[in-house]
Image (spheres, rainbow, N blue to C red):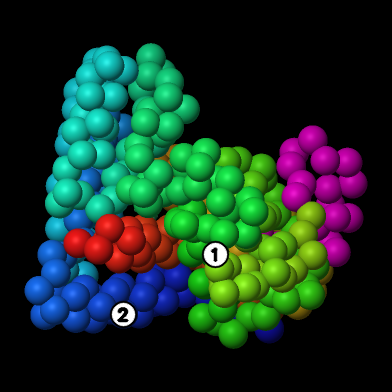
């Protein structure tokens, strides 16, 4: 039987509608709508699409958003100056610096310059540390989206064997933390799972993947996960966003749909969830700032 499709796009709509309600409630109470400042440097076409979609989602949910689109030859100092200005602006609750940045700019320096209280991507070391110790301020958007996707599809993570393919700072590492942690009042979304992180250099990769009850592919290689790597009845989440001959595809080969019990599609899976969770974090930031 073909795998159940985990429709991130539909779940993201539900989350955005919940956020819109909460925003409307706050505005009715005399508060400002939460505000997100997006910073885009250069003309990367994919980044332009993502930022446009983030702003559209803000608009639909009643959040304010501002785009700061800087030319590709912007210096690191100019970008730092903009980040410092946004840090001080009381209308701005969340700051998002779209990655990747042009090569001549040091990403780490820029991400550390964003004040942790407005760091809705949760990339700042202070927020990474809070997440690590089980007291997250903001949960990084893509991993948060994956956890919400599973939860809202009634897929239990507690006690499950989860294999994460990929060890990036944006997805693999934070997702492993969130997935393995014990839920608590401070960390209600934690997965309580048994987690293995693997990558392209992992020995016996196929056998490790076959042990997964939940397999999450975030390795950045088109169609990397084949049907032979998947245990029949497993849940497979595809975080990959790859372009092959101008067509978008994930890290999971479509043939996996014949073996898995459930599979998230690309497009229409984790991507839209990432954007919904960015809005959720911006709303949380506004709550923290009490604006
Ligand atoms: N500051 C950040 N930069 C980047 C992040 C991030 O979380 N914060 N993640 C990725 C890109 N990304 C978000 O910015 C992102 C990628 C894809 C999607 C998405 O909705 N994809 C759609 C397809 C869109 C298309 O047509 O190309 C889908 O999967 O259905 C959303 C966000 C790197 N940079």
> Are the residues tagged 2 and 1 within 8 Å (C-beta)?
no
Q: How crowded is the residue under tag 1: few (<14 C-alpha within 10 Å), some, or many (20+)?
A: many
Percent x, y of residue 169: 57, 41
- Horizontal side of 87 relative to 249 (left or right) equals left
Q: Is residue 214 magenta?
A: yes
- Horizontal side of 109 relative to 19 (left or right) equals right
**Residue at (33% x, 61% y) in the render:** 288
**Residue at (10% x, 74% y) in the render:** 30
Q: Which residue is mark 2?
A: 18
- Residue 42 appears in the picture as rendered: no
Residue 22: quarter of image: bottom left
**Residue at (54% x, 64% y) in the render:** 146
Q: Which region is colored magenta?
A: 197-216
Q: Nearer the viewer, residue 100 or 223?
A: 100
- SS under mark 1: helix
Relative to 151, say whether 98 is above or below. Answer: above
Relative to 112, say whether 6 is above or below. Answer: below
State the separation of the CA atoms marked 2 and 1. 18 Å
Q: Which residue is mark 1?
A: 146
């Amino acid at each position: 039987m073909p795998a159940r499709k985990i429709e991130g796009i539909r779940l993201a709509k539900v989350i955005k509608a919940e956020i819109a309600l909460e925003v409307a409630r706050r505005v009715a109470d005399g508060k400002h709508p939460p505000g997100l400042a997006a910073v885009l440097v250069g003309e990367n076409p994919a980044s332009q699409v993502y930022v446009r979609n983030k702003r559209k989602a803000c608009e639909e949910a009643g959040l304010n958003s501002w785009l700061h689109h800087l030319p590709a030859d912007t210096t690191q100092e100019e970008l730092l100056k903009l980040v410092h200005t946004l840090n001080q602006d009381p209308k701005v609750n969340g700051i998002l610096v779209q990655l990747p940045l042009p090569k001549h700019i040091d990403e780490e320096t820029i991400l550390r310059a964003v004040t942790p209280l407005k760091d809705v991507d949760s990339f700042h070391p202070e927020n990474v540390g809070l997440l690590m110790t089980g007291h997250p301020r903001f949960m990084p958007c893509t991993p948060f989206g994956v956890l919400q996707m599973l939860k809202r599809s009634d897929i239990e993570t507690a006690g499950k064997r989860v294999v994460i393919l990929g060890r990036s700072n944006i997805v693999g590492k934070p997702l492993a933390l969130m997935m393995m942690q014990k839920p608590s009042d401070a960390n209600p979304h934690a997965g309580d799972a048994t987690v293995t992180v693997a990558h392209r250099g992992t020995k016996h990769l196929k056998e490790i993947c076959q042990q997964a009850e939940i397999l999450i592919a975030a390795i950045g290689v088109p169609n990397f996960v084949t049907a032979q790597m998947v245990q029949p009845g497993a849940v497979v989440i595809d975080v990959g966003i790859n372009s092959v001959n101008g067509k978008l595809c994930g890290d999971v080969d479509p043939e996996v749909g014949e073996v898995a019990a459930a599979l998230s599609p690309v497009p229409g899976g984790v991507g839209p969830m990432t954007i919904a969770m960015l809005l959720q974090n911006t709303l949380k930031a506004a709550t923290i700032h009490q604006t």
